[in-house]
Amino acid sequence: MRDEIPPEGVRGQQTAGAGRRLARNLALYSLARLALVVVLTAVILLAARLVSVDIPLLVAALFALIIAMPLSLTLFKRLRAKVNEDIALVDERRRRDKAQLRARLRGENPEDTGASS
């Protein structure tokens, strides 16, 4: 059911708010990944302190960053999927607007360019 193409009016409404939704979801995803790096850094520093090893903050942060990269792909899968969907909607709108602009520049009726689908 998810692969169905919505009517043009509904699709226009979806893409109208997609830019704001994309910005919000991208900010949430970035903050979640940053928080994961901070938490992992704290865990690494605490674990090092427990075994009486001195690890510099920068080294712990770099290890946390390396660990967080693949971990965030699995932990934040749903949020990443939302970001990808919003990117697709914004990209679709950009392509449609670009096609309409090119049609107007050629002197054609812009409504005819999207009706052939």
Image (cartoon, rainbow, N blue to C red):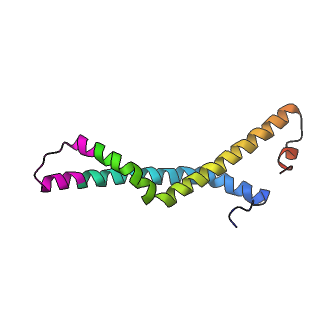
What residue appears at the point 24 percent right and 55 percent down from the top-left corner? 43
Q: Is residue 26 left or right of residue 17?
A: left
What residue appears at the point 12 percent right and 48 percent down from the top-left corner? 53
Q: Which residues are magenta?
A: 44-61
Which residue is the extreme one toward the top? 106
Q: Looking at the picture, how far across and down is residue 34, in whole percent?
A: 37, 50
Quarter the N terminus occupies: bottom right
Which residue is the extreme one toward the bottom? 1
Can residue 32 be seen from the camera position used here?
Answer: no
Does residue 7 sit above or below 68 in this rendering?
below
Query: Does the magenta portion include 98?
Result: no
Question: Main SS of the magenta segment?
Answer: helix
Which residue is the extreme one toward the left? 52
Q: Looking at the picture, how far across and down is residue 109, in whole percent?
A: 89, 41
Q: Looking at the picture, how far across and down is residue 92, in whole percent?
A: 70, 47
What residue appears at the point 34 percent right and 46 percent down from the top-left corner? 65
What residue appears at the point 69 percent right and 43 percent down from the top-left corner? 94
* Residue 103: quarter of image: top right
Looking at the image, which is closer to me, 76 or 21? 76
Q: Looking at the picture, how far across and down is residue 85, in whole percent?
A: 61, 54
| Number of marks drawn | 0
Q: Is residue 63 left or right of residue 90?
A: left
Can residue 31 be seen from the camera position used here?
Answer: yes
* Residue 62: quarter of image: top left
Q: Is residue 85 left or right of residue 80?
A: right
